[in-house]
Image (spheres, helix red, strand yellow):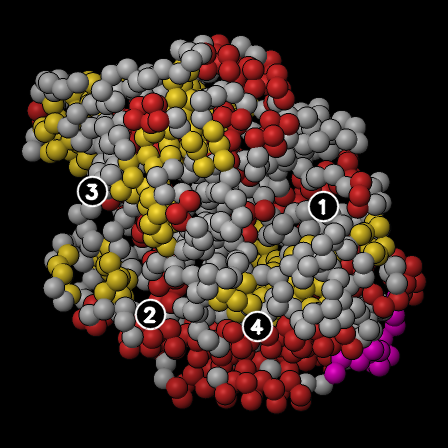
Amino acid sequence: MKWFAATALALTLLAPPATAQPGTGQAMDADFAARVEEWTTRPEFLSPLVDHLPVSDRVPSPKDVIGHHAGAPRELTYYAEMLEYYRALAAASPRVSVGPIGRTDEDREMVVVTIANEVTLAGLERYRQDLARLADPREIGETEAQDVIARAKPIYVLMAGLHSGETGPPEMLMELAYRLAVEEGPLFDRIRDELIVALIPAADPDGRDRYVDWYYRHLIDITDDRDRIGGPPYWGKYIFHDNNRDINYSQRSMRNVLDWYLEWHPPVMHDLHESIPFLYTFSGQAPQNPLLDPIVYGELPWFANFEMAQLTSYGMPGVWTHGFVDMWSPGYLAFMASNHNGLIRFYETFGNGGATTMKRHLKTEDNTPEQARTSREWYRPSPPYEEVEWSMRNNTNYSQTAALTALQLAASNPEVLLRNFYRKSRNAVEDGERNPPHGFVIPGGQRDMTRVSTLVDLLRIQGVEVGRADGALTFGAESYPAGSYVVKGGQPYFRLAKILLGNQEFPDDGLRTYDDTGWTMGLMHRVDVVAVDDPAVLDAPVEPIDEARVTGTIAREDEARFGYAVAHTGSNHLTTLRYRLGDTPVEAAEEGFEAGGVSFPPGSFIVEAPAGSDRAGRLRTWIVELGLTAAGLDERPDTATHPVDLPRLAIYSTWGNPQEVGWVRHAFDEFEIPFDLIFKERVREGDLRADYDVILIPNQGRTAKGLVFDIEPRGGPRAYTKTDRYRFLGDYGSSEDITGGMGIEGVLELQRFVGGGGLLVTLGAASYVPPEYGLTREIDARRPGTGFYAPGPLVEAEIKTPGHPIFYGYESTKTPVRYANGPLLDVPRRFRDDWVLMSFTNEVLSGHLRGADRIDGRPAVVDVPRGDGRVVLFATNPCYRWQNHGEFGMLFNTILHHNDLESGTGGETAQANP
């Protein structure tokens, strides 16, 4: 670290300054200069790096293609127009290329735009191979590594448009690409000669188009932030802001970026965001993940402080570091770089959520450092103004000036970036060889190997090497059966394996963090994962795998004169099987039984499908494909059963908070669970029982009032509909006015639905609604109060009624759950034995929870009979961000056994007053 600090400081001091004028005799665009001066609301919001633009008689500027300069008032660019510009730029300039990296959910093509000098661009494959050698240094020694470093070039990625409401960076990148392609002078020559700049124009292209439509329809005329309204209900197909929290890369666009990253190994991944004034540059403040290489924590402030100093030297106020986002959670998209021994970087540039110039009021009422962004602090020596007229061009000036400054530093120190990249990769290999744990074992023979395979595949898609043992393994006193998976130390991404597989121990009870504190994959999946301190694991005989495949097994297949039993071992795929079977009658065993030497736990399916029938053929195919365990039956088992009737299922979504609904929709689509997505309009219509057996209200909003009344109806009706002009609105639901919520009228319809025999299921914060609006009037829903802090820890819960259908497939009464900051439920003593199905303990398994005693013994799942129906309240969120696969089963079981939830409870449950 001393070498790094000294070298970085020396090279930074040697970095030549960027000049105000290129001094090359290039002709400059007079219209651009005049427009930028006009659109920039104060002279100090402009820098000498971006106050001019060269004119080229060969290469088109953005205005030549899209019709306006970047940062123009009231102008946003659709994604297809961006691609048109980049392709025109690449066609005209030998310094630019455009390459595809995949397609989105809505079939838009994602691209990476690469910019470098002509020679570098012609030899990109060689540079890709050089970076691959540095990323995996096991095949090269120190001497060869230094040779590679001397000839290689770092790829510096600038990514825009991950959050579609942050509209400025995609506009800015078009101008930056043109500037890097055509502008001459020492700064630009050095960037092109020493770096490969890769631009991702919009990391969520689907969301970009949807938001641009929304801006033109609803936001374009808002000029004061006190009149602002929200954005569209959707960006992408399922989620919006959480695309920067998708730790498992479940969304297609995020996976495209990851796949490209693992092919090209860029040492720097720089994500361009918008939120706080005027420009925050990420410096990696505490809490910091200690499993990352310490070099990262030197690189982050090195860049951030240089940028703050340079922009401040240009007279630009409001540039700061440190006081915002920390380095704890690894789930941000650009964190893929630090997870793979590179460097995450990001900006937050002030933005208006569109291209309209707007009066902004920045001073908060309490003006504390945590809330205010206008106070002077040690990390913010030149604070933003308390009030400001802010334009899209201001945004462009700041983010482009900062990006050029970052590229200036990187281009002046390419060997430092490459050497650090190599050293972090080498350190990761050596760390696993020298220090425990030396590996992880995911034992074979676990009760449900489908969740094991899901976990293993999530490691593999991130580049973590996994091997499968053909024979038994022994490390120390522990033995593991054949079929166990082994993650060895001594590989470049072993630090990432430790981050994902180990328990998270939060470093300081006094710190707060920006996102979750716990994400341990074994706990999230209910899969046994064992850290191995024995160095013998490094030499364990395993066969490397690309993916984990689980093939289902069928015992006594030739004796299936009656049909088949399919074991409920906790596999989420059992739900998929039930839906594939459709109208085929399926029964669930309420007690365990044996058949064909196979144990079948409660909840196992019994399907009448005699061998040789078409039904049996389909069933066998699906059992094998889904990795399930089954046996042929010569007769119906002598055990109590109930039918597994497929419900008519609706998922209710607000218009204002559909993101958590999106995660549920995604999971249901992945597991082939059909549903209707309904909104306030359908609930208000009434007669819900005629169409649905189950209504699921996922976690959304933070209060019951917020869920019931949703978006405040101000500013007139707010349509989310598809028209000839607004082609990208009206997907995944449609409304002439998304404001107002279901209201009391909607709550009454839900009450009628339950009273008429329907099942209402609420998740997380949605479980405030039934107690507070009288659907479960005997129950109170409280908040923890001051001093309580639970940023996504994994905690222990105790199943109080293990025979209940909701817990089919759960072999232990103690199970990990993610604490979701749902309500603290109070159930009257006389109902507790019947209604409380699962409760929290005070055991924190991973992550941070301050005030665990306040949840100890509190209900986590409550089943309340009401009229002819029921309300099931989850204080947890059993379907969270495609992460807690081990909890999915509780929700799936609730749906599958919707009309038999009294089974396994010993008979009739206590009835509340109607």
Kindly identify which residue carries mark 1. Answer: 78
Residues rendered magenta in the picture: 17-29
Classed neighbour count for the residue bearing mark 2: other residues with Cα under 10 Å, few (<14), some (14–19), many (≥20): many
Does residue 357 lie above or below 709 as drawn? Answer: below
Give the residue drawn at x 44%, y 73%.
Answer: 293
Is the residue under label 4 in contact with that under label 2 (CB below 8 Å)?
no
Q: Nearer the viewer, residue 830 or 610?
A: 830
Nearer the observer: mark 2 or 4; the answer is 4
Sequence-first disc among 4 and 3 = 4
Q: Give the amino acid type for the residue marked by disc 2 in the picture.
A: Gln
Sequence-first disc among 1 and 4 = 1
Q: Secondary structure at mark 1?
A: loop
Sequence-first disc among 2 and 4 = 4
Q: Give the amino acid type for the residue marked by disc 3 in the picture.
A: Arg
Residue 669 point in image, percent of width and height: 44, 33
Q: Secondary structure at mark 2?
A: loop
Kindly identify which residue carries mark 3. Answer: 447
274 sits left or right of 54 in the view: left
Kindly identify which residue carries mark 2. Answer: 491
Give the residue drawn at x 78%, y 77%.
Answer: 313
Is the residue under label 3 in contact with that under label 4 (CB below 8 Å)?
no
